[in-house]
Amino acid sequence: MRTSAKGAVRPLASAVVVAVLGLTSATVSAAPPSDTHSEGEQEAPAAAPDTASASVPMETAAPSEAHLHVESTARGARLFAEFLGEGKGESEAEPIDLGRLPVEEAALAPGRWRLRVVDPGYQEWSQEIDLRAGERLELVVEPELIEGAYLEARAADAASEGARLLLDGETLCTLPCRELIAPGDYRVEISKRRKKPLEFPLTVVQADEVVLEVSLEPATSRAPALITGSVALTTLAVGIGFTIAADRQRRELATELADHVQFDGSDPRIERGRRNAIIAGALYGVTGVAAGLTLFYLLRQTGVASRAQKHRRSLAGRPSWMLAPAVGETHFGLAGELRF
């Protein structure tokens, strides 16, 4: 009976240990053992509870990215990033397009980077930065505007290609073309052989982009001007001949009068000289009319005139409004921000 009593006490002690530790291991039992074992048989010791899982802390992964935030007044300009590795040097990887400024958030690998701003309205800008894993870098990028303005002339059709573009009488380029010019007021002339010319004023300011869509129409035929011009030259030459003949008759009669030679008023030379002078005057009149018609046909441009559609935009960033909700302990509403 002593052995049975002692055997009955030991399982209770095991049950208390399990209840205190709060373990549910399959090797530990809270039920009393069965009395079916024989005398002298040794009872197997209870297995130790497995507490290793409760004592090992969870490991957190180290951050593998850095974050970049860029503010800028050059709104719309593109920002590129070139990875330089751990130190300075030339980039071997393709540049990454971070989008248009400003950049709210960009995730990049830690290391050295070169930032570049690429935009036709701004001068070339670059800067090298160092990014550290898990950190957020904030930058303010302010590239400088270009000094001049861009003038681009496009041919609306194949017939307009090759036309000359002149600014204030000096040849700038041949269509199609794109040139950087100084800000100011200009007189633009566009011309091409057998095409109607085009002329108009143009004003450009710093960081402007002006695009001209040029369409030149066929020039008016000059055949009428050639005909009237020929008539004018012919009548002028014949009129001069009759003038010379009339003057010769006048001088001949004047010489005879000076020598006291007698002749009557019915002398045919008098009538002939008068007739030559009248014919010469009539021919001069025809010459004047023909010359006027020649100028009219030369300057007249019938049909549709040549034209140029003008498109203008500023390459500089413009001010913009940004609205965001604002909520506090004592207020709520919208907060506005004007960015330049």
Image: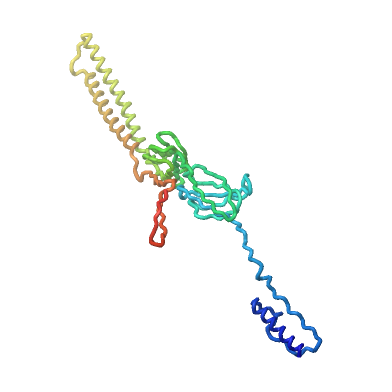
How far from the left and from the top, in percent, is residue 226?
A: 36, 35
Please say which color scheme the image uses: rainbow
Q: Nearest the camera: 206 or 151?
A: 206
Dividing the picture into quadrants, the one containing residue 231 is: top left
Q: Nearest the camera: 120 or 163?
A: 120
Q: Residue furthest left?
A: 265
Horizontal side of residue 335 vs 9, given as left or right: left
Q: Nearest the camera: 163 or 48?
A: 48
Horizontal side of residue 103 vs 273, given as left or right: right
Dividing the picture into quadrants, the one containing residue 236 is: top left
How far from the left and from the top, in percent, is residue 67?
A: 55, 54
Q: Residue furthest front?
A: 2
> Residue at 34% of width from left, 29% of height from top?
233
Horizontal side of residue 130 vs 183, given as left or right: right
Q: Is residue 279 above or below residue 67?
A: above
Horizontal side of residue 251 vs 25, given as left or right: left
> Residue at 20% of width from left, 14% of height from top?
263
> Residue at 76% of width from left, 91% of height from top?
1
